[in-house]
Image: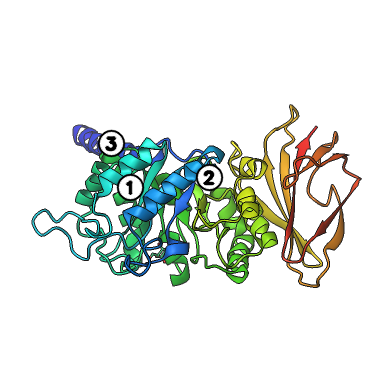
């Protein structure tokens, strides 16, 4: 009996150890210690595949190699933007007949993905690729479901550094097992690849609550909610989702594992100058991946300056990786706040604080808060700096002091409160 028990526990221990090792592999691939930054095709270029009609916009090796070049020549790479990510519509409609391998569209990617990856890597950048857990991608190209091991290996062979795995044409109830499985297969190739998962964005609308412990274990980032579109309305809808669900979502973020509210819209058609500052500030507060989707050749200088604002990027990339929250709303002015470095010897954090106006009544809106109302409690106070105008130091504020700001309609003001 004893001997049998011994054998059983040993067997059980072995299985547990194996599982632990497996999940351990997936848990920490050492990547995305700060939210990933880069450029991705979907929001701006969608599924444009007619290269004769739209030679500069179609999903093709030209588009990605042009944008890799622009990331460097326009100064984005120096500001931290690193990943060049192909979204949907890069595939042939069929797998290779003999090998069953995925095939990149032969007309639009004539040099093959290895050549594109080489070009991206030669520039000091990293290469990302989209696929889908189901039978098909959202745009109808072949998905990974029946070829997971082969596809993971193909990605590694193509020198991919980042995988976005979407969830169209799949059983939502299989995702909790299937996504970790694909992550494990990616890890088993031995090539480190950032793993971006979409399963919560499919589970939640279907009424299933995402298992965040599993997400943190298996994915470097995950899409929580709807796709972003090129409008203030879409942006606000996503911000509201994160604000309303923050108790559940905010604690999940940290080095190596991030919530993903989707791409940056800056540089496109839908957002004004003020609204562009707003998205950038709130994405920094949310410790969001900063993945642009725009035509980098067409970005106006003042929008480029927002995208490359080092002080705002530093908030997004803060080493503590603590996601921020919407802490109060008054007179349609929302206050969003994030704990950042430096932290004082007594353990008081510094903060990034954004004031977002949901107002449209013309003039900039003047509003006053006490420092205490902003949730800032350090007895020695805070030195305040305007993050959109680094030359503007506002002085030191203590608990009982009043803080006045003036926010443009549908705009933002954004400050760093450095604990003294
Ligand atoms: C889904 C994703 C988008 C994009 C498209 C591509 O909608 O959420 O980000 O990848 O599919 O078809």
Q: Residues within 10 Å of mark 1 (few under 14, many from 20)?
A: many
Q: Which mark is residue 74?
A: 2
- Where ligand 1 lies, by quadrant? bottom left
Give whichever of discs 2 and 1 has the lower sequence position.
Answer: 2
Q: CA distance from mark 3 to mark 1?
A: 12 Å
Is label 2 in a helix, a strand or a loop? loop
- Secondary element under disc 1, as helix, strand or loop, is helix
Q: Is residue 58 left or right of residue 233?
A: left
In-front residue for pair 230/402 = 230
Residue at horizontal 77 percent and vertical 35 percent from the top: 419
Residue at the spot 79% in from the left edge and 44% down from the top edge: 376
**Foreground tag (2 vs 1):** 2
The quarter of the displayed image where residue 169 is located: bottom left
Instruction: Name the disc covering residue 183, or none.
Output: 1
Q: Position of residue 163 (x, y in %)?
A: 36, 50
Furthest residue to the top? 345
Mark 3, ligand 1, within 8 Å: the answer is no
* Residue 190 numbered mark, or none: 3
The answer to whether mark 2 and mark 1 are in CB contact below 8 A is: no
> Closer to the camera: disc 2 or disc 3?
2
Mark 3, secondary structure of its residue: loop
Image quarter (top left, top right, bottom left or bottom right) of the N terminus: top left
The residues tagged by marks 2 and 3 sit, at their Cα atoms, a distance apart of: 33 Å
């Amino acid at each position: 009996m004893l001997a049998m028990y011994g054998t059983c526990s040993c067997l059980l221990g072995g299985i547990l150890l194996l599982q632990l090792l497996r999940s351990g592999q997936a848990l920490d691939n050492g990547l995305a210690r700060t939210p990933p930054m880069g450029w991705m095709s979907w929001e701006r270029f969608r599924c444009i595949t007619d290269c004769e009609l739209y030679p500069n916009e179609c999903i093709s090796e030209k588009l990605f190699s042009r944008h890799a070049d622009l990331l460097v020549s326009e100064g984005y790479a120096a500001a931290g933007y690193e990943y060049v990510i192909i979204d949907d519509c890069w595939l042939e409609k069929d797998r290779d007949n003999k090998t069953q391998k995925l095939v990149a569209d032969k007309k639009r990617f004539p040099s093959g993905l290895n050549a594109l990856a080489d070009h991206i890597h030669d520039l000091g950048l990293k290469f990302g690729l989209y696929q889908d857990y189901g039978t098909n991608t959202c745009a109808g190209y072949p998905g990974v479901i029946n070829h997971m091991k082969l596809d993971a290996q193909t990605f590694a062979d193509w020198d991919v550094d980042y995988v976005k795995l979407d969830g169209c044409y799949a059983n939502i109830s299989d995702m909790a097992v299937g996504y970790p499985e694909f992550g494990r297969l990616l890890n088993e190739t031995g090539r480190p690849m950032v793993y971006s998962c979409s399963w919560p964005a499919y589970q939640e609308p279907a009424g299933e609550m995402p298992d965040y412990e599993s997400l943190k274990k298996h994915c470097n980032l995950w899409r929580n909610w709807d796709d972003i579109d090129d409008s203030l309305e879409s942006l606000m809808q996503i911000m509201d989702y994160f604000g309303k669900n923050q108790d559940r979502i905010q604690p999940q973020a940290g080095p190596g594992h991030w919530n993903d509210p989707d791409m940056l819209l800056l540089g496109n058609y839908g957002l004004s100058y003020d609204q562009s500052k707003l998205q950038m500030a709130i994405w920094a507060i949310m410790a969001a991946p900063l993945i642009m989707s725009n035509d980098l050749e067409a970005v106006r200088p003042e929008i480029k300056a927002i995208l490359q604002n080092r002080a705002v990027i530093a908030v997004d990339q803060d080493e503590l990786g603590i996601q921020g929250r919407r802490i109060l709303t008054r007179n349609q002015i929302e206050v969003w706040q994030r704990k950042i470095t430096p932290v004082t010897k007594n353990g008081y954090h510094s903060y990034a604080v954004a004031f977002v106006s949901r107002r449209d009544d013309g003039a900039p809106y003047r509003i006053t808060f006490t420092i205490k109302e902003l949730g800032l409690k350090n007895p020695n106070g805070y030195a305040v700096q305007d993050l959109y105008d680094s030359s503007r130091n506002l002085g030191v504020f203590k608990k009982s002091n009043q803080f006045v700001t003036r926010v443009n309609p549908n705009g933002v003001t954004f400050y760093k409160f450095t604990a003294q």
